Image (cartoon, helix red, strand yellow):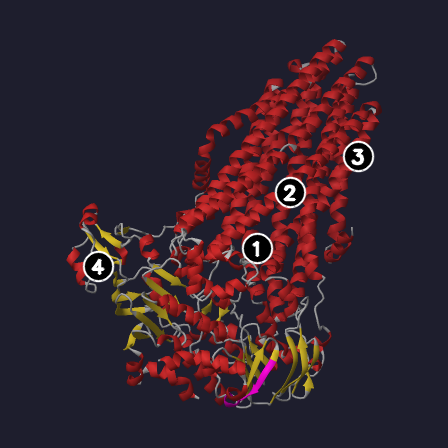
Amino acid sequence: MRMKPRSTSNTVKRLFRYMNKYRVLLIIAIIVIGLASLGAIIGNYMIRPIINSLVAGEGVATLARQVLITALIYLLSVIGQYIAGRLFVYCAENTTANIRHDVFSHIQTLPVKYFDQREHGDLMSAMTNDVDNVSIALGQSLSNIVRSVLMFLGTIMMMFILSPILSVINIILLGLLYFAVKIVASKSSKAFRSRQATLANLNGFIEEYMSGQKVIKVYNHEQETIEDFSEHNEKLFEDATKADTFATLMFPLTGNLTYVVFSIIAMIGSYMTINGVFAMDIGTLASYLNFTRNVSRPVTMIANQFNMIVAALAGAERIFDILDEEPEIDEGQVKLVTDQKGRCYWHVPTTLYDCQAIIARTEQMRQADLPDAEFTERYPGCLVPLRGDLRFVNVSFGYDNTHDPVLKDVSFYAKPGQRLAFVGTTGAGKTTITNLINRFYEINKGNIYFDGIDIRDIKKQDLRHQLGMVLQEVHLFEDTIKENIRYGRLDATDEEIVAAAKAANAHDLIMQLNDGYDTMLTPDGLNLSQGQRQLISIARAAVNDPPILILDEATSSVDTRTESLIGQGMDEIMQERTVFAIAHRLSTVRHSNAILVLENGLIIERGEHHELMDLKGRYYEFNTGVVELE
Amino acid sequence: MCMLRKTAKYYKGFMLFVILTPLLMILEVISDVIIPTLMGNTINEGVLTGRIDLVYKNGIYMIIIAVLAFLFGGISTYCGAKAGQGLGKNLRLALFEKIQTFSFASLDKFEVSSLITRLTNDIEIVSNVARMALRITIRAPFMFISATIMAIRINTRLSMVFLIALPVMMFGIMLTMKFGIPKFRKFQAKIDRINARTQENLTGIRVVKAFCREEFEKEKFAGQNQDLVKTALDALNLMIIIMPFMMLIMYAVIVAVLWFGGNFMLQGGMLAGDLFSFILYVGQILTSIMNIAMILMNFSRAKASLERIFEVLETESEFVESIKQGVSEVANGEINFNNVSFKYPGNQHFSLQNINLNIPSGSTVALIGSTGSAKSTLVHLIPRLYDVFEGEISIGGVPIKDYRIASLRDQVAIVLQENTLFSGTIRSNMKWGNPQASDQEIIRALEISQAADFVLNRPEGLSAKVERGGANFSGGQKQRLCIARTLLKNPKIMIFDDSTSAVDMSTEAKIRVELNKFNPDLTKIIIAQRISSIQNVDQIIVLDNGRISGIGTHAELLEDNRIYQEIYESQQKGMAAG
């Protein structure tokens, strides 16, 4: 994982940049909340004239007028608060949605390698918990903080207007209180951080051991596991107690100690009133004391938001980390174009290649494949017919630099319509080859040519569309069977979908289901067996009618009868296509034009079935090994 | 209430804190509500009459009381944290221990992810609420009651304001809740939906990329996302009324107090200090009501979590009685099934019916049949991962129910299909099989399972790091390591539950040969997919739909078992065509 200096201010800045889109609304919201706070403060101030006029015995008319004004101000303040609340929530929810959208979109562009290196859980938690935390912070904490800050400033201002001398004393006392709060806050945030780390550890432990719970049982390892767990649990208890203590200490600190300040001010204020120092009167004293009691409330409010803000910032950091990941590079300039007759060509811009070189790298072209003159004019450069010719030239590849390369200087070719089969022991690099053809991974050395064009020069989308993939791990979406097959080509008609399913031998199976093609697939796939899901995934690949088909067999968990259905389905859709088959069973590879035996990243044998059997090498061993070894 | 009683049990060891927290809290509240009265006295007795000595006296009282309140509050904070986290700790441990006693059937019932949420989020929520409960739950109502009493003492007639305000407030909150909660449910459902979508997208990211469906996925997501915003705003816009509404009531009460109180003052029935302390009490009463509303919201969350926790805690773990006692030595690897039937708990139909088998000690037996023919189910019954529904299984002549369950599982070792390694080192993983295993023994086991090469090739050897779930090993490597780990148990019976699916055939064959050399007396049961790999075993059992369709050697079955013939033909077709 990339390390980079964490900067909270950067994170905050980026968050604000997200809110920038709603800045007009936000500014209005802040102004409105400012006015509402001002209203609340003036309302509180009204105690002063009211008490004063009551003490002076000014009569009901004055009282009525003053109370009415107070009521009006309060009412406006509440209305303002509601409006501001709505505005904040609107901005926050939309900003959150934008962030969520950006993360999701960005994830779509990341290279496969990224997903190999990370747990899905981490990404999921960024998309859910982290985004939620940001959402709460923006929706609630932000407006609370803005309001609290304004209330605090307004209260202080009002206190200075009421009595500057009391306010100076007050500020000094509050300053002392502030220091106490600060010490607790810094302890609290430290304790909070260590608690988070311990919690993450414990959660990691829980996740790992819960996933392996059945294994624990089989090994009678319950007691040891409980002991390990207990250790984590104790540690969390200690850290969490500490964090909680400090976090909640804020309440008595700001709440009760404010009363100490309140009492001191009350004494000094009363003295001033009795002796008429600085024209102090009872109304002023009451109003002032009311403000003193409330001055720390916004501070408590802000302190309350602290945990949420910390969580949100940590979440935002993780979110931005994802957004900062480099997307998959796609510098390809070669695009696929289709002429009126529906024939497809690679359009290679003049600047890129010498056309002759491309042609020299592929099989002889048929006359029928050559583009019409009119079409050639529309696309300057060269037009290479799409045929499905694929060549590996001295390709080396390793998943990372620390381990041995998975493929070492591998070369082979498949002419249009040929079938190639790869066999070899586990980890020999068979699946890797398919991942290189569709550029899930970038090769370290050598070239891969598709119809004579280096695949790195082809626009990724156009390249992948020409490759029908049946991946080892079948993944279908929570949707109807029909839509799952349509995933292969979005504009496929229902008839084409049925045709593809028939070709893949999946039609009968689908028709046996209650809702046929409209059967919903459950996310856990409970309603279809692994083999049945594989049949559907073959249909999905078939519906796009790609010139090259890559079949990574996953038949290990498939029962034998379904397996034969799959075999027939694959045979059917392999017609007239270039096929790369990764075989884990040997029975399916015999029809291949060439069988390549991989071992330790090298091709150690290649040829047809008979040739390799005659060779009596590794392939022969594979075929007869079981019998021979036992 | 029932829930509360159940929870109380898990406060064990922290009872002192559970009692101290609210007790101290009450002392703090009492201090808090005395102060406004003292303040009123300061104004009435001191300021209005000019008696500065009474001002000082009341002032000093206030300071002392405020400091006391702080001490009570502070210590209560500590006790509350201790009690809340103590509950969390106890519950978490109890839950974890409970899950350790779960049978496979119970594990199937709760999914892994849901168990994880219960152990993490749910416990977190409960322990947080427990802490708050002990503090605010006590504080708010108590504050409410004592402040109200103080207010009534000052002026009973003025206190009538609350008689109107409180019902209005309650009614308003209830109304908002009534309309708000369904909206929130809808909102939550939408969030769940979008999370499920994301999860699906992430697991299928290779498919998305292979089919170039990034844009398509984005569009689908964008639609749901917009929808979510709408639902969220719908819910939130209603909920944010609550705060301004409460403020409105509070302000209305203050205005009313000022008006009526002012009139009382003009009529001479009330002093300025009384009016002021009354206003201070208004603040305390209304704040405590807001806190009560907040607690109720948190409680409903905690209740859901508690229910989820107790659902696990109250699940009966099966066959507890024989875990600790019973026969501890398995005499030999002979297995007998006597008319065994089995169905999964909660299932209508039988997965296995009338199974009768005799597997002699030291023999190698293969199970074959299509998916759903209950091959795994059958072998899971042998080490009592599930218990038979009818009939009896015995090993070495002793019914399996009579064995100590730990001994049974040690000596009847199964290599699960859903196997996993744990973070640590190769060595620490291997020691799961036998805690006393020496490095030589471990290496021997690795050699048998054909894992020695790739382990010893690593510079760290047996100390090589294993990441969470064994993520740094390939599927085939993991399976071979799991086999080695099982071997270290030195079992009498070894069951391979399709546990070599990612190992290629020649390696698999080598493992089998080495295994025979290692212990010829070992009974081996193999769930197989391919006939070619089991042709030479002593007995092949063909399962079809939970029943035995045939038992015999390869040649015998080929002769007279239709299903076996079918499987054989389908697997041979490729060969013949070549």
Residue, disc 3: B146
Quick check: is B554 in the magenta stretch? yes
The amino acid type of the residue labelled 3 equals: Ser
Q: Could you tell me if the residues under marks 2 and 1 are in contact, i.e. CB atoms within 8 Å?
A: no
The amino acid type of the residue labelled 2 equals: Leu
Q: Magenta span covers which residues? A: B548-556
Residue, disc 4: A368
Label 2 and label 4: CA atoms lie apart by 84 Å
Instruction: State whether discs 2 and 4 lie on one chain.
Output: yes
Q: Could you tell me if the residues under marks 4 and 3 are in contact, i.e. CB atoms within 8 Å?
A: no
Quick check: is A12 in the magenta stretch? no
User: Residue drawn at (42%, 53%), measured in percent from left and top?
Assistant: A493
In the rendered structure, find residue A342 and report the number of the disc placed on it: none
Q: Return the chain for callout 2.
A: A
Label 4 and label 3: CA atoms lie apart by 97 Å
Label 1 and label 4: CA atoms lie apart by 67 Å
Q: From the viewer's perspective, is residue B381 above or below residue B264?
A: below
Mark 1 nearby-residue class (10 Å; few <14, some 14–19, many ≥20):
many
Q: From the viewer's perspective, is residue B489 above or below residue A431?
A: below
Mark 4 nearby-residue class (10 Å; few <14, some 14–19, many ≥20):
few
In the rendered structure, find residue A199 and report the number of the disc placed on it: 1
Query: Percent x, y for residue A129?
Result: 54, 48
**Foreground: disc 3 or disc 2:** 3
Instruction: State whether discs 2 and 1 lie on one chain.
Output: yes
**Secondary structure of the residue carrying numbered label 1:** helix
**Foreground: disc 1 or disc 4:** 4
Residue, disc 2: A249
